Amino acid sequence: MLEYSFCWMSEKKLKGQVVWVTGASSGIGEELAYQLAQCGSRLILSARREDELQRVKRQCLGRSDLQDEDILVLPLDLLDRTSHEEKTKTVIQHFGRIDVLINNGGRSQRSLCTETSVDVYQALMELNFLGTVSITKQVLPYMTQQGSGIIVTVSSIVGIAGAPLSTGYSASKHALQGFFNSLRSELTDFPNILISTVLPGPVQSQIVHNAFTEELNKPVSSAGSQEHKMPTSRCVRLMLVGISNKIKEMWIAQQPFLLFFYAWQYTPTIAWMATNLLGRKRVQNFKAGLDADSAYFTKPKTS
């Protein structure tokens, strides 16, 4: 009953808001589009694949009372930073304002440091960190001018913790944590602008399928089973509750992952010990062709 009440409050607060979602063609971004549409938010859907964005738009229109003009499909490449100013102007011309920016675009990583090209590390920082910073810097002046706004950035549990197979991804998310924590302190003269970061644990999405490996153009050989992870719809529902209630940092995960948040935050020495123990299993399962996160639920193959 309490969660239902929170969801109703989220819908009421987000109705009519202009929300820009990056990475909206799949995974968390796609689910955000659907739930925001049901809340009555007006949407800007961005990602590289315009055909997928059009598919998401059709689904949004079919699941809500929104009209065609309430959803703007805006193809966007986070790596093409020279285009971000013009893309932002397009949003302003269409809706006149931006109430919420959700920085969701990015890619993960599944590879060992000793085997990973430096080019992969550069690509992760360019995409996850600098691409997000670039869009934020374009949107922020409009929010300061209107005196209000919400900037939400989807980070990760590895934004505050370490994890094997994700050295570059973790570094990019740590960078985002530092940037937005510092930005929040710079905006004390704008109390109606919320800087919020979301730190999900493992979630059922396409992020593993699209992850970087040891070489730039080498795909993941096997994504493994995702059934042990939090459903995307549940993660997004909790995100919207947090946004509506102006939460500055959200930890969203199932156990035992949520326990790691608290361990890293309050008992780092114990967290290091647990990370070393489970990290070894994670690498073993990765080498055995299983999903890396399934190390906490399954035993690695022995033959």
Image (cartoon, rainbow, N blue to C red):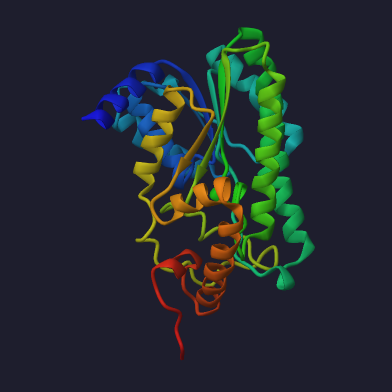
Depth order, front residue of 129/78: 129
Judged from this view, the residue extending furthest toward the top is 146
From what the image shows, is residue 264 above or below residue 115? above
Q: Answer left or right for 132 relative to 148.
A: right
Q: Answer left or right for 187 relative to 280.
A: right
Residue 29, position in %: x, y? 47, 40
Depth order, front residue of 105/49: 105
Query: Which residue is at a point 54% across and 28% down the rendered structure image?
Result: 248
From what the image shows, is residue 267 above or below residue 138? below
Q: Answer left or right for 273 relative to 251.
A: right
Residue 65, position in %: x, y? 30, 22
Residue 281, position in %: x, y? 52, 73
Residue 271, position in %: x, y? 56, 57
From what the image shows, is residue 274 above or below residue 28? below
Q: Is residue 55 visible?
A: no
Q: What is the tally of numbered marks visible in this picture?
A: 0
Q: Is residue 45 visible?
A: yes
User: Which corner quadrant of the image does residue 217 belong to?
Assistant: bottom right
Judged from this view, the residue extending furthest toward the bottom is 303
The quadrant of the rendering that contains the N terminus is top left
Depth order, front residue of 197/43: 197
Depth order, front residue of 47/262: 262
Query: Which residue is at a point 73% across and 40% down the rendered structure image?
Result: 130
